[in-house]
Amino acid sequence: MLSANAKWQHVFAEEKSPWEYAVDLANWSLQRRIRSSRQLHEVMVDFWSNHFHIPAIHDLAWCYRNQYDAMLRKRALGKFDDLLVAASLHPSMRLYLNNFESTKDNPNENQGRELLELHTVGRDAGYSEDDVKASARILTGYTVAVWEDWHSSYQPDSHTTGNVRVLGFAHANRSSDGRAVTAAYLRYLAHHPATARNIATKLALRFVSDDPSPALIRVLSRRFLASGTDIRTTLEALIEHPEFARSRGTKVRNPIEDYIATNRALEIKAKRPTDSDSQFARSAIWMCQGQYPFQWPRPDGLPQRNAPWASASRILGSLDMHYSLAGQWVGEKGSARFRPHASWLPADRVRLDRLVDHLSRLLLGRPASDRLQTAARQAVGYRAGEVIDRDHAIVQWLMPRLLTAILDTPEHMSR
């Protein structure tokens, strides 16, 4: 992994642009999410990437964004208090939220505010503007040598000393080396009941529904605090709750999730890419309907509710993506392995209705409904009793239509 300084040297030499580094990270992440057998880990990396969101193309933060991603991956299923400290003090976060230029003579409130509003207790916790200012003062001293060697460091001369109070946290803050008070402050916020409710609510929105019950939020909050902010333990409480079992199919997949799920369903395997941008692995982000991974423009991360992902234009974009992947029309020839169309047949000869049921079980994990049977017949123009073999038109050139009819269903486009 290249250092931040090495990346900037490549940029100054016009050998590579920040945008290209951002695209590489996005495509690499997509392939990890498609191919990994540790799906919960990948989902939680994505969850924390949204919670502690940093755009990969930010003017300055991009140079540390790969290292930031590695940090999130390492801690995605650990303790939230450890994750909060690591994310808050990471050079990429310092650059994104301007804390690198926050000093005792000129404090910048950006990270102090987002730490409270987005990353921990949330807006409803009742913090004040004075709390935001104190939060910013606590964080002073952490910097990055911008436009020099991009080294991240702590500068005691820049730290604001003196009594600080934020919500229930209070500290004399006498030392110019404020790293101890910063760590204590961050861990206090991590264990705050309002933070527990905030994280519990976000997890419920991600995994259960747009309207999770207060009872579920209470259960998750209590487990979060009782476990010492252990993420794995909190997830276990979520999975054990009856609302989770009833939640299947209630959440709309966003375009990125849809692309990943479609690749996995169709068993597409990208090959190691060359330098060509038209290679399958390098073209992945262009299939996400303009919603490139790590490119959300605001610090709040991608929306977790259904409505933003349920527009007509988004649905039409997904239908086109499904058809392109099912038709194997993406990327240079030979840059990915696709299942041969004949391999989808469960036997040498099979009726169309049984083929549709077989494909539904493979791609959707459930038998084909009457509605799906009707849609599939309309897609290929044959009756239910039509017998299909390897030489049939459905296998030879209509299989993309048949596969797409199954992928274009709510069952595939929700989770």
Image (cartoon, grey):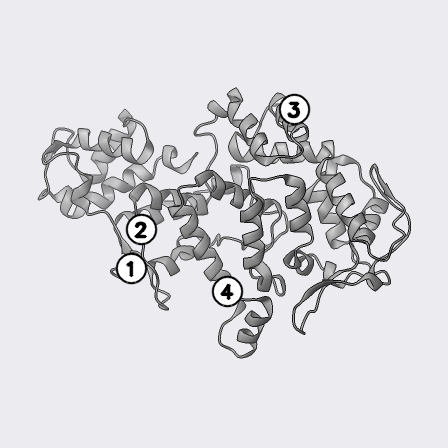
Between 214 and 319, the one lying in front of the other is 214
- Sequence-first tag of 2 and 1: 2
Residue 246 seen in the figure: no
Q: Mark 2 — residue? A: 269
The spot of residue 209 in percent (x, y) is: 53, 30
Q: How far is the residue under mark 2 from the one under mark 3?
A: 42 Å
- The local secondary structure at tag 3 comes to helix
- Sequence-first tag of 2 and 3: 3
Q: Mark 3 — residue? A: 218
Q: Which numbered circle lies on residue 335?
A: 1
Residue 370 seen in the figure: yes
Instruction: Say left or right for 244 vs 108.
Output: left
- Sequence-first tag of 3 and 4: 4
Q: Amino acid at mark 4?
A: Tyr
The spot of residue 32 in percent (x, y) is: 42, 50
Find out whether the residues at labels 2 and 3 contact each other: C-beta distance under 8 Å.
Answer: no
Q: How far is the residue under mark 4 from the one under mark 1?
A: 21 Å
Q: Amino acid at mark 3?
A: Arg
Q: How far is the residue under mark 4 from the one under mark 2?
A: 23 Å
Find out whether the residues at labels 3 and 4 contact each other: C-beta distance under 8 Å.
Answer: no
The spot of residue 334 in percent (x, y) is: 25, 60
- Sequence-first tag of 4 and 1: 4
Q: Mark 4 — residue? A: 21
User: Is residue 318 depicted above or below 90 in this figure?
Assistant: above
Q: Which numbered circle lies on residue 352?
A: none
- The local secondary structure at tag 1 comes to loop
